[in-house]
Image (spheres, helix red, strand yellow):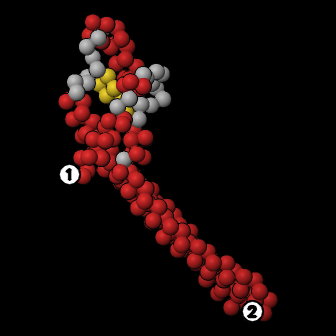
Amino acid sequence: MKRLLTALVAICIASTTAFAADVKIGYIEMQRALNGSEAGKEAKEQLAARLKKYQDEINVKQDELKKLKDDLEKQGSFLTDATKAAKEKDYQQRLKEFQRFTKDAQEELQGKDEEFTRKILEGMEKVIQEYGRKNGYAFIFVRNESMLFADEKADLTNEVLKLFNASRKK
């Protein structure tokens, strides 16, 4: 649907040559803007720190699980059936907790990534709208795979990125 709308807008603009001569059109490479922004770099650092923290915890828990399993295998023939069953149950419980922990950590990191991205995009959208109004743009698109051609002269990413970074310092 989005591609169809983009194509229809482009056709309408192209078919009205008198109008098209006065129309300023630009585009933003949003992924490059996100990655190049100071906010994006800070978000990546925060996510990397959280990931390292979780990875450290995961490594400790994996070592504990491995030790439990090794002990169970080594002592298995010497344990009574009841003791062996209790140790196996304990191991299975800890394994479930470990799996739940890794899943929760993954979901938390993904949620934080989405939250950071959303906040950055909201701020960037305001800067893009203001830039478009001040500079007389009729359209500013997000560059995507449905754009078959886009002249590099219409790329506003660097200009908007500078303004976005500057707006955060205020």
Instruction: Report whether residue 93 is seen.
Output: no
Vertical comparison of 142 with 5: above or below:
below
Which residue is pictured at 41% across the width and 31% down the height?
143
**In 3D space, how far apart are the residues under numbered discs 1 and 2 (Cα atoms)?**
68 Å
Instruction: Report whether residue 40 is seen.
Output: yes
Which residue is identified by label 2? Answer: 79
Q: Secondary structure at mark 1?
A: loop
Mark 1 or 2, closer to the camera: 1
Coordinates of residue 145 in the picture (x, y in percent): 48, 29
Which residue is pictured at 71% across the width and 86% down the height?
71
Q: Amino acid at mark 2?
A: Leu
Coordinates of residue 149 in the picture (x, y in percent): 46, 21
Coordinates of residue 112 in the picture (x, y in percent): 39, 58
> Does label 1 or label 2 sit earlier along the sequence?
2
Screen quadrant of the N terminus: top left
Left/right placement of residue 76 relative to residue 37 reads right
Q: Amino acid at mark 1?
A: Lys
In this view of the protein, which residue sits in the foreground, 11 or 133? 133
Q: How many marks?
A: 2
Left/right placement of residue 140 relative to residue 69 reads left
In this view of the protein, which residue sits in the foreground, 103 or 165? 165
Which residue is identified by label 1? Answer: 170
Among all residues in the image, which is located at the extreme right?
77
Coordinates of residue 169 in the picture (x, y in percent): 24, 52
Which residue is pictured at 31% across the width and 28% down the height?
140
Left/right placement of residue 19 relative to residue 155 reads left
Q: Secondary structure at mark 2?
A: loop
Vertical comparison of 152 with 42: above or below:
above
